[in-house]
Image (cartoon, rainbow, N blue to C red):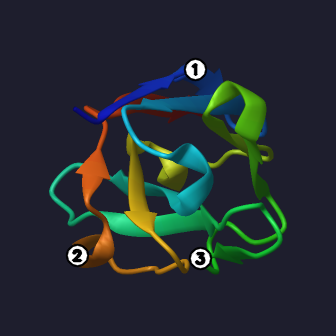
Amino acid sequence: QVHVVESGGGLVQTGGSLRLSCAASGLIFRSYTMAWFRQAPEKGREFVAAIDWPGAYTLYADSAKGRFTISRGNAKNAVYLQMNSLKSEDTAVYYCGTRRYSVSNSEDDYDYWGQGIQVTVSS
């Protein structure tokens, strides 16, 4: 059974930083692309960033480029999202998803999801 768990969210001031973590179990981690999506209140889930295995290729939403960095630690079955220069519009529930093979920015392409974690950026 696949299990995905996010951690590291919380409250931060505008301009601050947070590091989200996602731990996956029950799958062959090294075969799987990992990604972060987010969902703000009254909005749909949107793509943030994705990384393939072994981490040679990354894909970012325009809103994340230059501020967020996705990385993975294969030994620990984890993927991370370092978020810097946070803005109020980054406030959302952040979800970690996994899929086989290549990266994708489409929510429908991902097979397994975590429960999500709240990130709140206050001014």
Cα–Cα gap, marks 3 and 1 = 21 Å
Residue 49: mark in rendering? none
Camera-nearest label, 2 or 1: 2
Disc 2 secondary structure class? helix
Disc 3 secondary structure class? loop
* Other residues around mark 2 within 10 Å, as few (<14) / some (14–19) / many (≥20): few
Which of 15/84 is in front? 84
Residue 107 in sight from this viewpoint: yes
Which of 20/121 is in front? 20
Residue 108: mark in rendering? 2
Residue type at mark 3 is Ala
Question: Percent position (x, y) of residue 116?
Answer: 32, 34
CB atoms at circles 2 and 1 under 8 Å apart? no
Left or right side of 31 for 42: left
Q: Which residue is mark 3?
A: 61
Left or right side of 94 for 22: right
Residue type at mark 2 is Asp
Q: Which residue is mark 1?
A: 8
